[in-house]
Image (tube, rainbow, N blue to C red):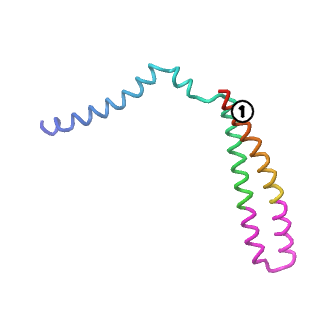
Amino acid sequence: MTRTLRLLPPVLAVLLALATPSSLLAASPDAAAAAEPSKNCSTARKKADKEQRSLTAATESIARDKKGRETCSSKSMCARYDTAISDMEKRQARHETRLTRFKEDVVKSCATS
């Protein structure tokens, strides 16, 4: 019996804690809807995040190719590394430009929501 009485308060506290958030959410659905960003804002953020991941991948690829270039053993292999590094640097510049534009779009679309 004493064991049951010792467990009762923690169990009641857990049940009360679980019941409270759902009752608060049910009472104020407008507050949750107001906190959500607009569709344009979330789309702009997704585009900016995706472009950031692409920029990171390009930067990592350049670093990997430069490291490989340092240890290349044949002239043709070094030439391939040089070409890959050059192409990725151009691609990185394009990603940086697009990322800047997408971040501006995020600021514009999220400020209005």
Q: Is residue 11 above or below residue 34?
A: below
Q: Residue 59, image x and y in percent? A: 73, 59
Q: How many marks?
A: 1
In terms of depth relative to the viewer, which is nearer, 100 or 84?
Answer: 100
Q: In what element is the residue under mark 1? A: helix
Residue at figure coordinates x 86%, y 78% from the top left: 75
Task: Name the kind of residue labelled 1 in the image.
Answer: Lys
Judge whether 77 appears above or below 12 on screen.
Answer: below
Q: Find out whether residue 101 is within the magenta segment.
A: no
Q: In this view, does 107 lie to the left or right of 25?
A: right
Image-based side of 11 in relation to 35, left or right: left
Looking at the magenta stretch, what is its main secondary structure?
Answer: helix
At 78% from the left edge and 77% from the top edge, which residue is drawn? Answer: 72
Quadrant of the image containing the N terminus: top left
Kindly identify which residue carries mark 1: 108
Q: Which image quarter holds the C terminus?
A: top right
Neighbour class for label 1 at 10 Å: few (<14), some, many (≥20)? some
Q: In the image, is 78 to the left or to the right of 108?
A: right
Compare residues 100 and 42 and report the one nearer the observer: 100
Q: Position of residue 77 (x, y in %)?
A: 83, 74
Q: Position of residue 95 (x, y in %)?
A: 78, 50
Residue closest to the far bottom: 73
Residue 43 in the image: x percent, y percent?
Answer: 69, 35
The stretch of residues the image draws in magenta is 61-87
Work out whether 36 lies above or below 49.
above
